[in-house]
Image (spheres, rainbow, N blue to C red):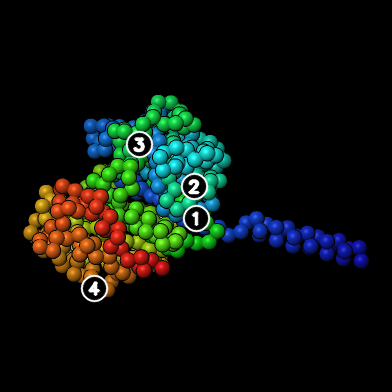
Amino acid sequence: MRLSALLCAITLGAITVGASGLAAAAAPSHWVGSWGASPAMPMAAPANNPARGTASFNNQTVTQVIRLSAGGTRLRIRLSNEYGTKPLEVGVARVALLTADGAVVAGSERTVTFSGAGAATIPAGAPMLSDPVALATKPLARLRVSLFFPTDTNGCTCHMTGMDLISVAPGDVTAKPPPAAKGAGDYRAFLTEVDVETAAPIKPVIATFGDSITDGYRSSDDANRRWPDRLAERLAAAGKPFAVVNTAISGNRVLSEQLPIFGQNALARFDRDVLQVPGVTHVTVLEGVNDLGMTKPTPTAEQMIAGYRQLIARAHEHGVKIIGATVLPYSGASYFSAAGEAERQKINAWIRTGHAFDGVIDFDAAIRDPAKPDHMKADLQSGDWLHPNDAGYRVMGEAVDLALFR
């Protein structure tokens, strides 16, 4: 009996120690979104491709450089074949950190695996997450992602406005320096998200939801001059390790859509592009000018507000705070109309005073011309009187009250 009791005690002790060891080894970790580019369209033949260059690849390596917002102990990438009509073969995926001048940080190159394998086949219509990559990153780190496609991709699940030039080279050159990216294309090919792992939740993770003005259209390529980029810089400078994930799609609308190039309407894509961002706690919404300019007849403010209320309700259902941004002035743009301007004024008045959003960013006040309030300030617009220039995007990024994110 004594021997039996002793053996039992030893066994229980071993189990306790083992359980403790396992608990220590499996200490809680948290994945949070650090970068994003919402898939918007199936790009195919160059003749139908609004971006520069081709968007179908065969025995080619595509290299893309991005800037993370938050850092972490490990990372993972998310690829998308959501607009693909056949399985997508990924032969090799590699990542590396880059210095400010584009050189590879010594010792930072890693091969990315998927379920333990160096290659992956992504079913038509599906996304795919990689395995965790043992690569520590800091806020605002530059990451190079190289993808080798051994067979014809038959088009591309792409994000149209990347504002960073990509590089395309024949064969598998994922382990070699890529050729110059100049003129190769400024879309995102298959890469839709990079997450980082942290020991504790980052608060907050901000999804910036909207159209081309949040996407940074007409800002400088390879310069990270979008207004969400400036927001991320300000948060980092303030010592706040917060994440900013850009979930905008150029040309996007709240209530309607023009497929395939401008993505699904905001109400259709909100769950995928915002609520599924790992760790998301806040979302900013700057969207509506394309509804007012592109849609005929012009939607009323009441119709637009009903759409915003849907986004608000769905965000709140998931415990996400939602911040409304006023619609920028657009007089002088090709699709400007007096009817659209009248509805914009009503929409902005409701965003400011309706108390339906959890907070407000008054981009309209920050960028409008006081002498002509239906226009942007001339020195802040890019030439089309619809999109800001680099200076305008910086003003927008500076106009965001950091106290909104707690």
Q: Earlier in the sequence, mark 3 or mark 1?
A: 1
Q: Calculate the distance from the C-alpha at mark 1 to the C-alpha at mark 4.
A: 34 Å
Residue 77 on image: x %, y %: 46, 45
Q: Calculate the distance from the C-alpha at mark 3 to the C-alpha at mark 2.
A: 20 Å
Q: Secondary structure at mark 2?
A: strand
Look at label 3 and name its amino acid: Ile
- Residue 273, relative to residue 309: is it above or below? above
The image's mark for residue 31 is 1
Q: Secondary structure at mark 3?
A: loop
Look at label 1 and name its amino acid: Trp
Q: What residue sits right under mark 4 in the picture?
A: 354
Query: Image point 20% across, 59% down: which residue?
Result: 367
Residue 369 on image: x %, y %: 14, 60
Q: What residue sits right under mark 2 in the picture?
A: 76
Look at label 2 and name its amino acid: Arg
Disc 1: CA contacts within 10 A as few (<14), some (14-19) or many (>=20): many
Q: What residue sits right under mark 3 in the picture?
A: 166
